[in-house]
């Protein structure tokens, strides 16, 4: 999943490193037996961990040390330097820790230690739910199920998914997998045996029809019922469908699931031209991926500038230029009026040849089940700072959850993969009685052609977008401010700056909460 150069860099750490060269909190990249390893000094301790992120192989030695943790510069996974545990998604697997011996003013790195980073004592007692059910087979549900077992939960754990495939790496569906540069065996988050080994009852093709909150039961398709003591709703979102002539033709599709991506790949193999309706992240990533397959690609959207509502006019205009340099053609300020077997007719009167049409105009949170159950909803499922809904014993996470943002105090709902995973992890711990506040700063990344953008936090509106650096040189950051306060930061090829911005925004949110209490 990575094109990172795996050639070892730095010193052979088994030969020792002079302690005077180790600055506190500054990683030193080195190697042990051909494996990338990094040393980090924390006070009088010197810690050694694998220097490769278990998510996509990012270089941890280029990351950010905060206390006894290190954050990956690529997608902001976070690991413990003392145990190797993957503390925050998107990484799910720990990194190995190695023994360090200090003698004669030098630090020598030895064998891998058995830290049992993911082991916890089994949880027992009347306060522990006997049966936990997760509704949803996406990022939030998967992360919650794994965290429950990591935290030592030994009760009955059921995961219900209406999909026909287990949890997958959804961001890849519109990126490398659709582009043809990632094989399908990269896509599942875990193999089938993982669920058996961890006693997770994963039931596919199992829609939930209703929740009986009084009896704490779920009504499944076919009339079966399933009891729960604690319930997590992680039902995700559904692609918005367009009601226009020809929208149901066989060459028209959306992209949300692995099945959707497979269909698009199959259709792209025999196609020469494609029209992508929508200039949001999914639309633009699909456009880049189809262009990588050699198709002629047209993007149709009513927007004046691609991604202007999220990234602003300047960065959105830059993205348009990136796509146009790779041969993508834009038709902005217009919408499709009709789809025909071999073309798309626009409201402007223009007709575009199209063997394949992809509708990427956004998603809507899947909240019908929550509404049926009588949960409080407001453009999503309303949750408190612990992600619990208005009904005790029911939590919500991922695309459906609208939670109080620590930085602004406003309720927000964010459709980001990493947010969904981290919320699933927090909800899992809270179902076990932890009472933990969800305070992680939202993060997402997008890859389009040869450009990658990282974005931390969430700005629904701003009054200025300040660019530092050069967009033309693909070396810049954009800070989104409202009333002089930074709300979010987008970066191009400034991974370290993105990590520092994330930490600063986290601390600003924590400070606001502390001031209120």
Image (cartoon, helix red, strand yellow):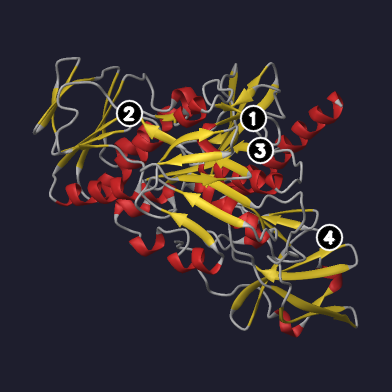
Report the quarter where the C terminus lies.
top right
Residue found at x 30% / y 40%: 287
Mark 3 and mark 1: Cα distance apart in space: 6 Å
Residue visible at 86% across and 70% down in the picture:
20
Does residue 150 appear anywhere in the picture? yes
Q: How many marks?
A: 4
User: Circle 3 is placed at which residue position?
Assistant: 393
Q: Which residue is mark 1?
A: 391
Q: Residue at x 9, y 33 (%)?
A: 342
Of tags 2 and 4, the one toward the viewer is 2
In the image, is residue 107 above or below residue 25? Answer: below
Identify the residue shown where x is 67% and y is 45%: 426
- Mark 2 or mark 3, which is nearer the start of the sequence? 2
Marks 2 and 1, how far apart at CA: 37 Å
Label 1 CA crowd tier, 10 Å (few <14, some 14–19, many 20+): few
* Residue 304 rendering spot, x and y as whole percentages: 36, 18
């Amino acid at each position: 999943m990575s094109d990172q150069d795996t050639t070892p860099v730095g010193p052979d750490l088994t030969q020792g490193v002079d302690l005077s060269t180790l600055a506190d909190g500054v990683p030193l990249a080195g190697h042990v037996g051909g494996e990338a390893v990094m040393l980090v000094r924390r006070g009088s301790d010197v810690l050694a961990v694998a220097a490769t992120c278990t998510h996509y192989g990012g270089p941890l030695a280029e990351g950010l040390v905060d206390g006894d943790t290190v954050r990956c510069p690529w997608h902001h996974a976070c690991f413990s330097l003392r145990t190797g545990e993957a503390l925050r998604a998107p990484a799910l697997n720990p990194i190995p820790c190695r023994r360090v011996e200090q003698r004669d003013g030098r630090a020598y790195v030895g064998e891998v230690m058995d830290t049992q980073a993911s082991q916890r004592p089994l949880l027992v007692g009347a306060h522990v739910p006997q049966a936990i059910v997760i509704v949803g087979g996406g990022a939030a549900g998967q992360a919650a199920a794994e965290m429950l077992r990591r935290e030592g939960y030994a009760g009955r754990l059921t995961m219900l998914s209406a999909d026909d495939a287990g949890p997958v790496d959804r961001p890849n569906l519109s990126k490398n997998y659709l582009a043809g540069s990632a094989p399908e065996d990269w896509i599942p988050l875990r193999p089938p045996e993982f669920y058996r080994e961890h006693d997770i009852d994963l039931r596919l093709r199992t829609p939930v029809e209703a929740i009986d909150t009084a009896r704490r039961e779920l009504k499944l398709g076919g009339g079966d019922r399933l009891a729960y003591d604690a319930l997590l709703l992680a039902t995700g979102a559904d692609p918005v469908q367009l009601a226009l002539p020809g929208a149901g033709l066989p060459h028209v599709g959306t992209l949300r699931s692995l099945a959707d991506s497979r269909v698009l790949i199959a259709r792209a193999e025999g196609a020469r031209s494609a029209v992508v309706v929508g200039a949001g992240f999914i639309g633009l990533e699909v456009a880049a991926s189809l262009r990588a397959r050699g198709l002629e690609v047209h993007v149709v959207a009513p927007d004046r500038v691609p991604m202007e509502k999220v990234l602003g006019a300047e960065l959105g205009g830059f993205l348009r230029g990136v796509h146009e340099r790779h041969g993508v053609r834009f038709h902005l300020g217009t919408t499709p009026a009709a789809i025909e077997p071999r073309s798309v007719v626009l409201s402007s009167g223009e007709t575009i040849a199209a063997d394949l049409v992809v509708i990427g105009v956004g998603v809507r949170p899947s909240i019908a089940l929550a509404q049926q159950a009588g949960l409080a909803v407001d453009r999503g499922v309303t949750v408190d700072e612990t992600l619990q809904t208005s009904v005790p014993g029911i939590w919500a996470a991922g695309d459906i959850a609208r939670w109080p943002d620590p930085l602004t105090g406003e309720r927000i709902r964010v459709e980001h993969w990493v947010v969904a995973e981290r919320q699933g992890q927090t909800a899992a711990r809270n179902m076990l009685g932890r009472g933990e506040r969800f305070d992680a700063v939202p993060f997402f990344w997008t890859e389009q052609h040869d450009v990658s953008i990282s974005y931390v936090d969430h700005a629904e509106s701003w009054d200025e977008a300040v660019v530092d650096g050069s967009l033309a040189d693909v070396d810049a950051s954009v800070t989104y401010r409202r009333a002089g306060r930074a709300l979010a930061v987008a970066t191009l090829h400034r991974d370290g700056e993105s990590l520092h911005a994330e930490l600063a925004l986290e601390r600003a949110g924590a400070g606001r909460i502390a001031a209120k209490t």
